[in-house]
Amino acid sequence: MKSLYTELQWLPAVPADFAARIKAAGASEQPLGRELQALANHALDLDQSIRLAKAIQKARTAGHPLDGLTPFRLAVLSNATIDFIVPALVAAAARHGIALEVIQPSYDQVAQEAFTPDSKVNSAKPDAVLFAIDYRAVPLKPVFGDAEAAAQNVQGVIAYLKSLQAAIKANSGATCIFQTFAPPAESIFGSLDRALPGSIKNQLNAINAQIGEFCLETGDVLFDVDGLAQTVGIADWHDVRMWNMGKFAFSPDLIPLYADHVARLVAALRGKSRRCLILDLDNTVWGGIIGDDGLEGIKIAQGDAVGEAHLAVQKLALDLRARGIVLAVCSKNEDEIARTPFQSHPEMLLRLNHIAVFHANWNDKATNIKAIAEELSLGIDAMVFLDDNPVERGLVRKLLPSVAVPELPEDAALYARTLTAAGYFEAVAFASEDLKRAGYYQDNARRVQLQKQVEGVDAYLASLDMTITFQPFNAPGRARIAQLINKSNQFNLTTRRYTETDVQSFEDDPSTFTLQVRLADTFGDNGMISVIICKPGSDATWEIDTWLMSCRVLGRKVENMVLAEILEHARRAGITRLTGTFLPTERNKLVIQHYAKLGFAQVSEDASGRTEWALDVAGAQPDTAPMRVISQGFTPLKENTVV
């Protein structure tokens, strides 16, 4: 069972031509990002990870573009040996779509690097700093039975970690990633260690809880190493021989697993976590084949081992939906037959109202998955496809390599566990709107269906009975604003990333104009769907630093309404000119003509495709859409109006 984690068994086995492909990549002068990511997307051991990392480094050194991979700079501060961890991090990051550059200071220089303003780490200005330290790096002594001394010890460790965080924030501005501490395997009192105040295990439990609270408060990132170590076994995690010989904080056999977990967090920081789970039906959601076995013949019931295994898949799907993951169905079946268990089987946990898009037909599954993504207005790379059939899994991987397709074992009892082990839905923050996200996408799919029934765009927009609400940045919206800034890729003009702390600084800066935009319609509340940041420029100009929007509301002229709101406030502020920038990425081609469509004049373009745009405020009159406008929280408050 442990091998599921230690061998990364949710990933396909390493291909026989792995070495040859690595060699070919090293000799190629073509863009290599896609090929290197494809190679990384296998169950690599440590040696294979190191070989892939060398190929990535060689490509980077030679100046070959790593197309499709998002750059990220990560500094790693540790009290242990990390020489083998660094290349594993680079390889695992490629798996998750990240071109990772690791800043590695000298051994055991955690405090020196954090507190020295011009240290190697601070001078490098990384995107994030990983504090890869274990319990041996903090001032912690056993004080058996002394609760007061234990509390002081705990607060001392937390204060130390907070001081590291403050120093990194002040000196580099990087996001901090804090690990929880895996306790040593050795016990002093046996089971009593957990409960006895002052034992190492008891103190580490308290410290880990406070690290979690600290990260939630500050917007920094939590890496639950304690949870990971307990999953694979504390005794296997701590290899005392390797600590004594080489100061390895954990077993080298577990480095690929550790690296994959770090890479998931980095990917989540860059908005690359998956958003939709697409389910096959026969022998995945239920046991048996509905078309052959009928409603009474499929296995989906308590008291039956096979039935309970598939119920576990359904329960996991529902739990994921509850936290905001969209559910869809992709099955080779007759539509009416495939829907029958959802409507009529008394043991089914999943019902049709849980499914945003339902595709049951005889098309190939890659075609159906593309259609599902289109209906949900999500990218293909937001999809996870769960299917028991290895042939179907292989087809989707070949035709849609951006779709995550976990390998599944023969035993259906392990399907749910394998899906969670893969970590496709990693989150670094949580906002209350996440709970509603699955509903948002489900409603959007219904809007797509409505649009097919209504003649003409204007008639369709009018039928939606939309209300758009504009507010400046504020404390209640701060976490969601930061989340959108770090997750939005397609409708994002500059793809600049900001932390919650950055968002608060914009919020507090009276010279910066900000907008958070919400949209509601006849199907419900879409939540926050757009974020704007305008910074002051010279000569009565606002420079649009950030303009992003959820693709769920594309085609409704929301961007026109946003521009009208910006113009309204610009005129009040005496601003005469708006300027905007388009910074091209692999994923934002959707908005390459955004400013042109809104009437901006192009000012410049450089070799990278970066374009600069300008609009005179006085004469600008963007086309608007039939929707009620609410503008609140600004000074002075504008009365509600109807366009």
Image (spheres, grey):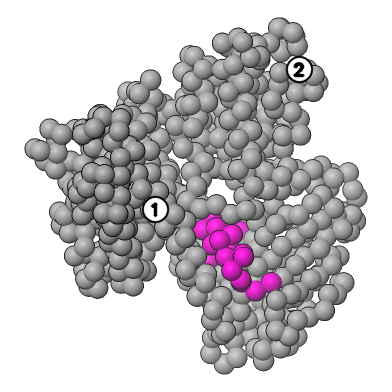
Q: Please identify the quadrant where the C terminus is shown.
A: bottom right
- Give the number of the mark in front: 2 or 1: 1
Horizontal side, residue 630 vs residue 410: left or right = right
The residue carrying mark 1 is 210
Distance from the alpha carbon under mark 2 to that under mark 1: 45 Å
Q: Is residue 612 visible?
A: no
Residue in the picture at 76% in, 74% down:
631
Residue in the picture at 36% in, 59% down:
176
- Secondary structure state at the residue bearing disc 1: helix
Residue in the picture at 30% in, 66% down:
163
Can you tell which quarter of the image residue 239 is in? top left
Horizontal side, residue 171 vs residue 371: left or right = left
Q: Position of residue 537 (x, y in %)?
A: 54, 86
The answer to which of 589 and 276 lies nearer the viewer is 276
The residue carrying mark 2 is 345
Which segment did they paint magenta?
A: 471-494
Residue in the picture at 59% in, 86% down:
541
- Secondary structure state at the residue bearing disc 2: loop
